[in-house]
């Protein structure tokens, strides 16, 4: 595609059918503060490489879609002010205007699939916000997952959301949700939401088996592999509720809504928890990068006919 600029190591890996894992940049530009964001991006890439996969961090840079960023470009997206938050619907405008954009899940999976990458990892997907039945604030990630054939590894949806409604919308969108080593939908910073899942795998090979069937059936929707945060970094559900309610109240008082709401809540909860949620966010994102790479390697080993 005309607007794609594929980084040479990613191009080489794709041409040789080797494992490639895509990452997003909104997590870096809007989800975490400097320098934790740059460190997280680098650690995610290193985790993929350690498993034998090539990382491809995706962004819009000067109106071009970059499939794979080198370290200076990653640092740019971590440091620069005023980077646009680019969802799938914003891609064309960001390109035409020659902008710099950090791509969200919805935009990143569209670009990854266009480049021929079939696995993507992030921290947590967007979903239905609390009170979504009134505000209609439902992340475009959900409908994008419903119409993009890509495997997405994440720690469930962000705990600031209404997780039960988020699971309902994923079901409506035909997104297959599989617990990795768990029977319950993980809650981002917390290991458990208490919401039961129907499908579970315990190894990357078992996951790869399902992905082969998904591919053979020519499904147009994503498979979501949900991986709980490491015990060591997990945060108590009750503490999270208190911080989230406080942050939600502040957002309402300050009139924050739309695109700014998720970054605002994440940043306020980071401050209220004295940085514990930031450490947790990094740990879970790196864990998901590692698992995605293991699954990509398992898939590449036997092909995906
Ligand atoms: N995962 C994280 N932190 C983030 C995000 C994901 O650990 O900040 C980003 C993703 O880019 C996701 C976006 O697509 O948050 C959701 O934003 P919204 O709720 O506005 O759709
Ligand atoms: Mn929203």
Image (cartoon, helix red, strand yellow):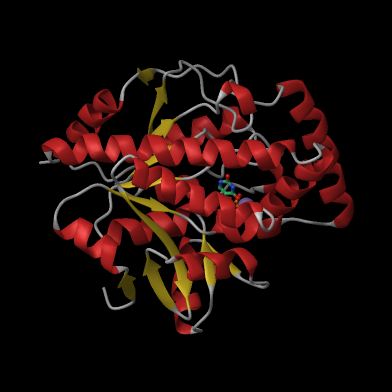
Image quadrant for the N terminus?
A: bottom left
User: Tag count in the figure?
Assistant: 0
Instruction: Name the residue nearer the viewer: 248 or 235.
Output: 235
Is residue 223 in view from this perspective?
A: no
Of all residues, the one furthest to the right in this rendering is 253
Residue 25 at what x, y percent from top left?
A: 51, 59
Instruction: In the rendered view, tell whether residue 119 sits above or below residue 5.
Output: above
Relative height, residue 69 to residue 129 (above, below): below
Which quarter of the rendered picture does the C terminus lie within? top left
- Residue 258: where, in percent of width, then height? 68, 57
Q: Is residue 302 above or below residue 250?
A: above
Q: Quadrant of residue 3?
A: bottom left
| Location of residue 247 in the rendering, given as x and y in whole percent from the top left corner | 82, 42
Going 33% across and 40% down the picture, which residue do you hit?
293
**Residue 29 as seen in the image, left or right of residue 111:** right
Query: Image check: 48 left or right of 132?
Result: left
Residue shown at 45% from the left, 30% from the top: 226
6 and 177: which one is in front? 6
Residue 302, by quadrant, is top left
**Residue 18 in the image: x percent, y percent?**
19, 49
């Amino acid at each position: 595609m005309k607007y794609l600029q594929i980084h040479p190591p990613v191009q080489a890996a794709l041409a040789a059918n080797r494992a490639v894992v895509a990452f997003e940049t909104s997590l870096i530009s809007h989800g975490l503060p400097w320098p934790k964001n740059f460190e997280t991006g680098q650690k995610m890439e290193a985790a993929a490489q350690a498993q034998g996969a090539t990382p491809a961090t995706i962004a819009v840079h000067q109106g071009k879609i970059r499939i794979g960023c080198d370290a200076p470009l990653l640092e740019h997206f971590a440091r620069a002010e005023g980077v646009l938050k680019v969802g799938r619907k914003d891609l064309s405008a960001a390109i035409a205007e020659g902008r710099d954009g950090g791509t969200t899940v919805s935009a990143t999976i569209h670009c990854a699939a266009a480049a021929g990458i079939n696995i993507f990892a992030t921290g947590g997907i967007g979903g239905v916000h609390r009170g979504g039945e009134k505000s209609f604030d439902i992340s475009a990630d959900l409908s994008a997952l419903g119409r993009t054939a890509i495997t997405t590894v994440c720690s469930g949806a962000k705990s600031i959301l209404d997780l039960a409604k988020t699971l309902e919308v994923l079901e409506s969108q035909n997104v297959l949700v599989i617990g990795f080593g768990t029977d319950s939908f993980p809650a981002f910073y917390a290991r458990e939401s208490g919401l039961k899942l129907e499908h579970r795998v315990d190894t990357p090979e078992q996951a790869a088996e399902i992905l082969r069937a998904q591919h053979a059936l020519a499904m147009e929707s994503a498979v979501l592999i949900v991986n709980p945060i490491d015990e060591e970094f997990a945060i108590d559900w009750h503490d999270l509720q208190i911080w989230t309610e406080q942050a939600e109240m502040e957002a309402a008082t300050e009139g924050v809504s739309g695109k700014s709401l998720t970054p605002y809540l994440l940043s306020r909860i980071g401050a209220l928890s004295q940085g514990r949620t930031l450490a947790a966010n990094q740990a879970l994102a790196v864990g998901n990068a590692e698992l995605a790479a293991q699954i990509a390697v398992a898939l590449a080993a036997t092909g995906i006919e």
